[in-house]
Amino acid sequence: MAVRSIEKGEAAAEPIRKAHPTTKIEVWELDMLSYPSVCAFAQRCSTLPRLDVAILNAGIGSGPASKINKATGHEETIQVNYLSTALLSILLLPTLSPKNPTGAPGRLTIVGSGTALFSTFPNHTADPLLPSFNTPFSGTVASGERYAVSKLLVMMLVYQLSQAISADRVIINTVEPGLTSGTQLHRDFSSGGKVFMSLLKSVAAKTPEQAAYTYIDAVAVQGQESHGCFVMFWQVCA
């Protein structure tokens, strides 16, 4: 389990250990706002005898105003949801690729969002593109667009990675779990935004267990036909 807070990670791991006492669960530190942390985590993974599956779940939704990550100079939603996710994905590919050429392919699933389908991507013609995401923004609409475009970039990443590495080596896809309760995705929202999201989750959200089913489907049920694709409602969307 990769976590920002080892203390919180251990608290989450403990009931799983009790339920499955023969399973070894380790909690490793990973801060997606820090490139050195991402690199250190990937290096630690490379020391494993093998790595069969990686599910990249880290994500944030920006609050009423944008925040610049002091360590990298990038807006935090783009930093976590795309830039650090892209870096970690690329660094994990050699470890996920089977050592035996005839072995089963590794699996890399990045958690996406159907909101990507509604992104207007207003800065798509910017050149260079990435610095254009650092322009300050504020307001609910702008915040929602930033989250949506960060997930659209994830779709593009998954497609491009699928062109660079064969599905015989690593099957790469992205999955839509749907709105899920019990997460801190909206922790930076304004008080009014938090109330709205709380009410929305109370009537429309999946439980964490239900959302986890979508992860398992994407990473263990869907096959090579999902390579480079978006999995939504249990279906592979090209």
Image (cartoon, rainbow, N blue to C red):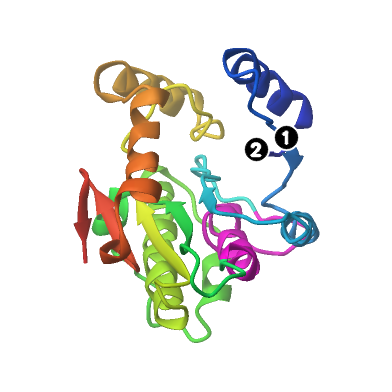
Q: Position of residue 21 (x, y in %)?
A: 65, 18
Q: Earlier in the sequence, mark 2 or mark 1?
A: 2
- Secondary structure at numbered mark 1: loop
Magenta stretch holds residue 69: yes
Instruction: Give the extent of the magenta segment.
Output: 68-96
- In space, the residues marked 2 and 1 are separated at their CA atoms by 6 Å
Q: Position of residue 203 (x, y in %)?
A: 25, 17
| Residue that mark 1 sits on | 26
Which label sits on residue 219? Answer: none
The quadrant of the picture occupied by the C terminus is bottom left
Number of numbered discs on residues: 2
| Residue that mark 2 sits on | 1
Magenta stretch holds residue 135: no
Q: Is residue 56 left or right of residue 72?
A: left
Q: Is residue 150 visible?
A: yes
Q: Position of residue 159 (x, y in %)?
A: 37, 73
Predominant SS of the magenta segment: helix
**Local crowd at mark 1 within 10 Å, few (<14), some, or many (≥20)?**
few
Name the kind of residue labelled 1 in the image.
Answer: Glu
